[in-house]
Image: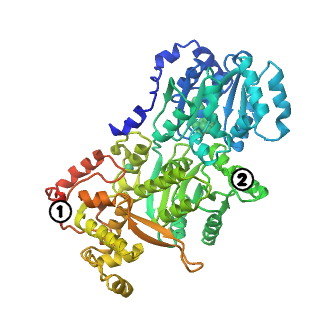
Amino acid sequence: TPLFSAVATLRPPPSETPSEASLKSSPHYPEVVEKLRKVFRLKAFRKNQLAAVISTLDGRDAIVLMPTGGGKSLCYQLPAVCRGGKTGGVTVVISPLRALMSDQVERLRSLDIDVMMLASMDSQDGNSMHDLRSTSTTPSLVYVTPEKLYCNDAMKGILKGLHARRLLARFVIDEAHLINTWGRDFRSSGYGALFNIRKEYQDIPIVALTATATSEALQDIVTALGLSDYVLLSQSFNRPNLRYKVIPKKRDIETGIVQFIKEKYPNETGIIYCNSRAKTEEVAMRLKGQGLLTRHFHAGLADGDRKRIQQLWQNDACKIIVATVAFGMGVDKANGKCSRLQMLCNSLTFSTVRFVIHYDIPESVDAYCQETGRSGRDGKVADCILYYSYHDIQKRILQINKDTEIDDIQKDRKRQAVHTVNQFCLNEIDCRRMLLLNHFTEKFDPASCKGTCDNCASTDEVTDIELTTSAIQFVKMIQELENRCMKITGALSLHAFRGTSKHDMARRKFDTVDHFGKGSDLSTDLAKRLFDHLVAREILATELEEAQVANRAPISYVYLGSKAKEFLTNRPSFILTIRSARRGAVRSKRGLQWQAPILAPTISIRKKRASLEAAQDPVEPCSPNDTE
Ligand code: ADP
Ligand code: MG
Ligand code: ZN
C-alpha cells in the first residue's frame, strides 16, 4: 500500500526487528535487566526499549522512532552503563539543546552515573577534556553539542584518541531529525558535519533517535549518517487521550478561549502557542483582561524573567503560558540560547498540561504533533485546539518568502509544510487522528477514533458537491485576468466570479471579463470553499504583497497555480466533500460523486459513502467532457 511504501523503499532497507524471544536469549539480557532495576530503578521496559538496548550492545546501528515522552533516553543511557564504564568505553551523545542536556545530566548524576557534559565553546570544559585525553577511566556518557564536536579541534582530537584506545562505545544522535533541518539551515553548525561520522568512525555503532517519524525525515537520517545494516524501531504515534479540534479563526477568539478554559479546565495547566513574540504579549494581556491568569513566554525575555516564570509555572502559581514556537526546537537564532519552556515541556516534573491551543497555525504537521504532544503526558484526556484562518497561511508563506537565512530548497520544503497544514485544517470530513498518523506513514482505522476528534464527533451529514464546471470557470476567469495583466485580490475575485453588485468597483473593473458572474449560482460560502480548495490543490495560488501604503496589511492576489494547466487540460471532476449543516453550504445541482479528499486515503471515504448512499441518490460520475 502507498502508506508504507515510503518506509519500505528506504535504501538500504532496515533489518528485521529482533523478536522478543531473541532479545531475551541475548547474552546481554541478564545485565540489562539488572541495570534497569538497580541503576535506573525502573521495573519494566517500554515498547522497543529493550530491542534498542540489545541492538546497540550487539554493535548494530539503530534508529529509534518514539513519540516525545516515550522514553528514548533510556535506549542509550542503559547500554552506556552496561559492561562497566571502563571496558565498555564512552557513549558519546550528540544533543542539540544545552538546556535539555543539563536536565539529563542532572538526572543521571542523581542516579550515580558518571557523566560529562561538554557544551561550551570556550575553555570552561578544559579540565574534563584533559581527563578524557589522559586517563583510562572514562565516564559512561559524554554529552556534547554538535558545534563542539566538529568545530573544536581539541574535541576532535579527544575522540580520535578514545577511538584509538578502543574506548568509544557508540555515538548517539538525539533529536536526529535535526541532521536535516539544521544541516541545511545552519551550515556552520555542527549538525551538517555529522554527515562524516560514519566515514571517520566506521566500526562505531550509531543510535539515532527522533520523535519525527515522517518517511522524509527517516530517509534523511539514513542517507546523512550513511547507515546500511540498521535496526529500525518504530511504534504507533497515536495518542488516544488527546482530543483534536480545528476551529475557524474569527474575530475575538480570546472570548472563546476564556470560555473553554473556564468551563472545562478552570484550574489546569495549558499552553497557548502564538507565532511571534509580540503576539504572545498581546494575547496574554487580552486573556488577563478577561480574567484568566496567564503569562507570556518567549526566548527574548530577560534571563531573570524567564527564571521567574519558570518558577511560577513549576509551583503551579501560573498555569497558562502563552508562548512562541518560532524556532521549533526552542533555540533562539538571535542569541543561541535555549528556551527553558522547551525543557519544561519535555520534563515531567511539572504539573500536567491539559490543553494546547494553537492561536496561530503551526509551521508544519510535524510541529503540530510535537506541540500538541506536550499535553496529556499522564495519559488522561487533554484537548488540542487549532485556530485556523487562511490568512494565517498566507502570512506564513510571505514570511518564508522573505526569510533571507534559508535557501530555495529549504523555502520549498517549508512552503510545502504550510500547504499540508492548510489541507489538514480545511478537511472537515476525515478523522484528524488518521490524517496525522498517515502523515507519519502509519495506518489508522478511523473507527478506532470513536469520536475523539472534531470530524469524527460531528453529527452533521456529509455531502459531496460536484463543482467541476464552476471550478473550471473560476480558473478560466483567473487565466483570463492574468492574460490581460489584471491583478485581482482573493476577495474581489469571489465577487467578480459571483457577479455580486455590492462591489461597484469590481463590477466596473471586471465586468468586461468573459467569466464575470459565471458563478452566480453559488452561495458566498460555497464559492469561498471552492476557492479555498482550488488553492489547497494548487490549481490556484495566492501571494501576499506588501501594501503600497504604509501600515496597511499586505494584500493577497490570486494567480494560476502550478497545477492549473493540468487541471484545465484534463478537467478531472472537482468535488467538495462538506458538512452540510454549515450555513448556506449546500447546492445540489449535479448530484453526488465520490473522490478522495485531499490528505486522505480512500478507505474512510468508502465507509462514509455506504452510510450515505441510503439517504442520497447515487449519480453516474460525470466524464470530464460533459461538464461544459
Ligand atoms: P523522550 O526522550 O522519548 O521524549 P524521555 O527519555 O525523556 O522521553 O522519557 C520520558 C519519561 O519517561 C522520563 O520521565 C523517563 O524517566 C520515563 N521512562 C522512560 N522509560 C521508562 C520505563 N521503562 N519505565 C518507566 N518510566 C520510563
Ligand atoms: Mg528526548
Ligand atoms: Zn477521528
Of marks 1 and 2, the one in the foreground: 1
Residue 309, can we see it? Answer: yes
Tell which circle, 1 or 2, labels the residue nearer the N-terminal end: 2
- Quick check: 312 left or right of 627? right
Rendered view: 256 above or below 152 = below
Disc 1 secondary structure class: loop
Count of numbered badges drawn on the protein: 2
Q: For the C terminus, which image quadrant?
A: bottom left
Of 111 and 250, which appears nearest the observer? 250
Q: Which mark is residue 365?
A: none
Rendered view: 85 above or below 105 = above
Q: Which mark is residue 591?
A: 1
Q: Quadrant of residue 324?
A: bottom right
Q: Is mark 2 within 8 Å of ligand 1?
A: no
| Residue ID for mark 2 | 310
Rendered view: 93 above or below 169 = below
Which residue lies at the image location 53% right of the left edge and 24% below the top edge? 51
- Quick check: 407 left or right of 591? right
- Quick check: 468 left or right of 331? left
**The residue under label 2 is which amino acid type?**
Gln
**The residue under label 1 is which amino acid type?**
Gly
- Quick check: 392 left or right of 172? left
Rendered view: 421 above or below 217 = below
Of 426 and 199, which appears nearest the observer? 199
Residue 119: where, in percent of width, then height?
75, 39
Residue 214, can we see it? Answer: no
Disc 2 secondary structure class: helix
Residue 413: where, in percent of width, then height?
50, 50
Residue 243: where, in percent of width, then height?
46, 51
Q: Is mark 1 within 8 Å of ligand 3?
A: no
